[in-house]
Amino acid sequence: MPVIAVVDYDMGNLHSVCKGLEKVGATPQITHAAKDLELADAVVLPGVGAFDPAVQHLRSLDLEQPIKDTISSGKPFLGICLGLQILFESSAEGTQPGLGIVPGKVRRFQPEPGITIPHMGWNQLEFTQPKSLLWEHLPANPWVYFVHSYYVDPINPEVRAATVTHGSQTITAAIAHENLTAVQFHPEKSSNIGLQILSNFVAQVREKIAA
């Protein structure tokens, strides 16, 4: 079974992510050791909470460079929620620089009549990279679960793998570029659709091991 390092930097409940990965046939390993990231078959960076504490915790654990090394090595990588946002250069939520792996900024939803901020609950994805391996065996416009007040705005629109619409604002819901994938929603809270997405990620990991 593929070993997937789940990065623990005190930002969120890792239990449900690990349970999801176990269900789809992977062995999750919760860790904050660079060596484990290096030895694992893939890495998942989850996260719930605020941008500044997240990047500060990662830096205090000396995980910034190991995460960058993991991604540049070609190893499958999945960011979830805050784990997507901290890959960007900066956030309107804080003052700390992000990891800068994906050029672009994290922005706040603009208030408008009739929408709630945070954007919370079920919403439908619109695939912008319909052939992405992340979306295999999924119906068109699947419903997934979101909880966020900020969203990523990549400079290169081609990295967008899916969008979601909240009020009049259509924002990036997922990115995919080579071995790097990251989603704004919570696959581990998105019922069978979410499990299929995790299963697709694990299938990519198996393919990589077999190659």
Image (cartoon, grey):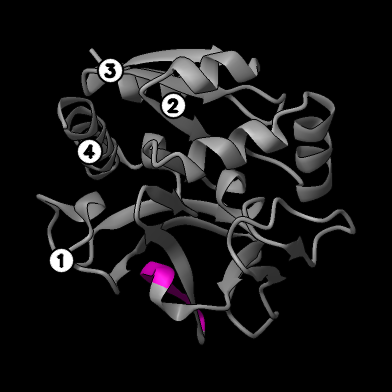
Question: Was residue 39 drawn as part of the magenta stretch in this picture?
Answer: no
Crowding at label 3, few (<14), some or many (≥20) Cα neighbours within 10 Å? some
Q: Say which residue label 1 marks.
A: 140
Q: Say which residue label 3 marks.
A: 2
Front residue of this view, candidates 206 and 188: 206
**Tag 3, which secondary structure?**
loop
Q: Earlier in the sequence, mark 3 or mark 4?
A: 3
Please state which of the two labelled residues, at mark 3 or mark 1, is closer to the viewer: 3
Whether the residues at callouts 2 and 3 have beta carbons within 8 Å, the answer is: no
Residue drawn 45% across the image and 23% down it: 16
Q: Identity of the amino acid at label 1?
A: Ala
**Tag 2, which secondary structure?**
helix
Stretch of the chain drawn in magenta = 159-167
Q: CA distance from mark 2 to mark 3?
A: 15 Å
- Evaluate whether residue 68 shows in this view: yes
How far from the left and from the top, in percent, is residue 58?
75, 33
Q: Identity of the amino acid at label 2?
A: Val
Q: Identity of the amino acid at label 4?
A: Gln
Residue drawn 60% across the image and 36% down it: 67
Front residue of this view, candidates 189 and 204: 204
Q: Say which residue label 4 marks.
A: 204
Q: CA distance from mark 1 to mark 4?
A: 21 Å
How far from the left and from the top, in percent, is residue 140?
15, 66
Q: Say which residue label 2 marks.
A: 17
Q: Identity of the amino acid at label 3?
A: Pro
Q: Earlier in the sequence, mark 2 or mark 1?
A: 2
Q: CA distance from mark 2 to mark 4?
A: 17 Å
Residue drawn 57% across the image and 78% down it: 155
